[in-house]
């Protein structure tokens, strides 16, 4: 008996447990769709853009704005991205905007600061279950950063390029959950797992069930087979045999000669 499988065996195993695989995939995919649609809370994101640059007086003091100065300003963006998430900024936000109802730790968890390569523009993104609150928080953090950064660094030219719209005409959709993506992931993962389990069950099942199994594994011809008879068929067979015996013993089947 060999454990090696050819392509036909793979198709046979899949066909043998096809309905089980389809059932598992269907249940998991539908469950993922229902969870993403009705259970998972939608998360919204609002963002602002900030640029930090040297002022005209600073440029004049340095005589010229050369490439080294620009590169230095770009590298400083990484520093600003870290500063904006420190208590030096967030504590001020909590103090001056109590209506947000957030602590410094909660703010730090909601804020994501990014920048485009080779630019001096930062994007401050805030996520929340409410788009309005996300927009208010993003605007508050950006405003406090604009006010406080000149005292931390000798930077005078800090501008907010755009504020997050509090009440946009068309409110953007949530960034999470991504329902189509979740359904696709659930479909692929459940399909892989169900097929894997089907092959595992087949590998662990060493019983012989059919005549084809005898010929395949033992390489011997089938001489005889015993059919399985259920209880109803067995009772019907007994009744039929009993009727035949009774009919054979009746007098109307016996004739007497004279």
Image (tube, rainbow, N blue to C red):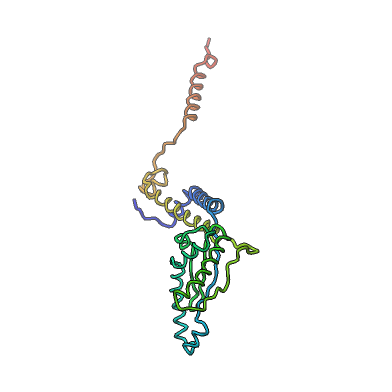
Query: Residue, x 49% and y 62% (percent of image)?
Result: 95
Vertical order, 114 against 73 (above or below): above
Q: Estimate the x, y position of residue 42 in percent, counting from the top left.
A: 55, 56
Where's residue 147, x and y in %? 51, 72
Asked whether 10 or 169 is in front, the reply is: 169
Residue at the spot 39% in from the left edge and 49% down from the top edge:
216
Of the pair 248 and 107, the residue shown nearer to us: 107
Outermost right residue: 169
Judge by depth and name the residue closer to the eye, 50 or 102: 102
Residue 242 visible to the viewer:
yes
* Number of marks present in the image shown: 0
**Is there any visible trace of residue 119 in the rendered image?**
no
Question: Looking at the picture, how far across and down is residue 49, in whole percent?
Answer: 54, 72
- Could you tell me residue 175's position as x and y percent? 54, 61
* Residue toward you, 232 or 73: 73
Q: Residue lying at the far left in this picture: please name it.
A: 1
Q: Residue at x 41, y 52 (%)?
A: 199
Residue 226 occupies which quadrant of the picture?
A: top left
Q: Residue furthest bottom?
A: 63
């Amino acid at each position: 008996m060999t454990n090696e499988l050819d392509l036909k065996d793979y198709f046979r195993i899949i066909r043998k447990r096809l309905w089980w695989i389809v059932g598992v995939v269907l249940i998991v995919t539908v469950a993922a769709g229902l969870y993403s649609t009705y259970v998972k809370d939608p998360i919204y994101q609002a963002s602002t853009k900030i640029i930090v640059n040297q002022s005209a007086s600073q440029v004049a003091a340095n005589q010229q704005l050369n490439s080294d100065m620009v590169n230095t300003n770009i590298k400083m963006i990484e520093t600003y991205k870290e500063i904006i998430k420190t208590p030096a900024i967030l504590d001020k936000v909590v103090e001056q905007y109590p209506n947000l109802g957030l602590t410094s730790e909660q703010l730090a968890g909601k804020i994501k600061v990014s920048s485009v390569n080779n630019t001096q523009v930062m994007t401050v993104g805030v996520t929340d279950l409410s788009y309005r609150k996300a927009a208010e928080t993003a605007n508050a953090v950006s405003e406090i950063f604009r006010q406080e950064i000149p005292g931390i660094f000798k930077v005078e030219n800090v501008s907010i390029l755009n504020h997050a719209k509090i009440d946009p005409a068309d409110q953007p959709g949530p960034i999470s959950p991504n329902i189509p993506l979740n359904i696709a992931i659930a479909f692929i993962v459940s399909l892989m797992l169900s097929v894997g389990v089907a092959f595992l069950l087949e590998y662990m099942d060493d019983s012989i069930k059919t005549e084809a199994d005898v010929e395949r594994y033992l390489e011997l011809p089938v001489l005889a087979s015993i059919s399985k008879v259920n209880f109803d068929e067995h009772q019907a067979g007994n009744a039929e045999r009993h009727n035949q015996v009774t009919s054979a013993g009746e007098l109307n089947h016996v004739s007497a000669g004279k």
